[in-house]
Image: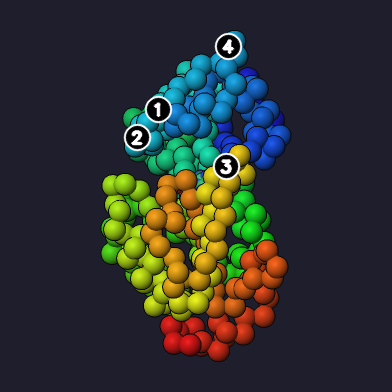
Amino acid sequence: MKLSQNGWVVIAGLGPGNDALVTQEVRDAIDEATDIVGYIPYVKRIEPREGLTLHASDNRVEVDRATHALEMAAEGKRVVVVSSGDPGVFAMASAVFEALENSAEAHPEWLDLEIKVLPGITAMLAAAAAIGAPLGHDFAAINLSDNLKPWSLIEKRLQLVGEAGLAMAFYNPRSKSRPHQFARALEILREACGAETLITFARDVTKPGQELLTVPLKDATPEMADMRTVVIVGNRDTRRVGNYVYTPATQLRVKRGNGTARP
Ligand code: SAH
């Protein structure tokens, strides 16, 4: 990847946790950077060095953080905005473009800044790989946090996606500020996908304390998930073979279900 010596913004994904999964182009951008911007635990992953300023901030102010990155780039700084996983998956890449759009009147010159998004391995793909191939066929990724959308919309999506026979991956499944919602999500999933459908709780994927737990939906409890967990629900054909969980190419049960909730 070629980056200039003028100001730029790179929005980079650091992958799920293991440093071996950080791509070479992300490492190169960090080596070229003058400033790193991001949520505290992600900025902690960057090795401090002479000439590099670390701006660690709280997660709730994503667009402010993105605006700060654009301001610094406009001053000629080389800024890397770090996200975990992939920056385009429930992370900073959208926030940077939103900040760019919000500032287009006040700072039209920002539209000409060099902005690049560098992908990373997102949590659901690292988790799927750790357990086998549960997302081997059609699937949907859903953020269960209702910070940015109403909970009623999340419920509707769970129901329709479940009935459509897609496997699912859930980010931000359960936090202390909304303890009851994940229990409700499990109820909807049992109804829409069938109680025997397999659900996997993958915690701290690729990190030292990685935990993987697969059970049928009927045995799943809300306590199995927290904010360090990504949750994968298969479709009606998803099954175990030995220690693995996979979704076969031939979707017999989903097909027989005719795309509805009835078995
Ligand atoms: N951009 C990130 C997602 C940020 S949202 C990505 O692409 O992975 C934060 C959520 O991601 C967490 O609540 C959790 O559901 C999931 N997550 C991120 N890293 C994880 C890991 N190592 N193990 C399990 N879940 C993870």
Query: Is 223 positioned to the left or the right of 229 in the image?
Result: left
Crowd band around label 1 with a 10 angstrom C-alpha radius: few (<14), some (14–19), many (20+):
some
Q: Which residue is mark 2?
A: 61
Q: Earlier in the sequence, mark 2 or mark 3?
A: 2
At x 48%, y 27%, the residue is 37
Task: Give the mark nearer the N terminus: 4 vs 3.
Answer: 4
What residue is shown with label 3? 209
Q: Nearer the viewer, residue 204 or 168?
A: 204
Compute the Cα span from label 2 to label 3: 29 Å
Using the rendered view, name the quadrant where residue 243 is placed: bottom right
Q: CA distance from mark 2 to mark 4?
A: 26 Å
| Residue at x 51%, y 32% (from the top left corner) | 42
Name the residue type under label 3. Answer: Gly
Is the Cβ of the residue at disc 1 closer than 8 Å to that at disc 2?
yes
Q: Amino acid at mark 1?
A: Ser
> 109 or 206: nearer the eye?
206
| Residue drawn at 35 percent across, 48 percent down | 175
Name the secondary structure under disc 2: loop
Left or right position of 132 against 140 = right
Is label 1 or label 2 in front?
1
Residue 210 in the image, given as x and y percentages of width and height:
58, 46
- From the image, state whether disc 2 or disc 3 is nearer to you: 3
User: Badge 4: how crowded within 10 Å, few (<14), some, or many (20+)?
Assistant: few
Q: Where does label 4 land, which residue?
A: 51
Is 171 above or below relative to 83? Answer: below
Q: Residue 214 at what x, y percent from top left?
A: 55, 63
Which residue is denoted by mark 1 in the rendering? Answer: 57
Cα distance in 3D space between marks 3 and 1: 25 Å
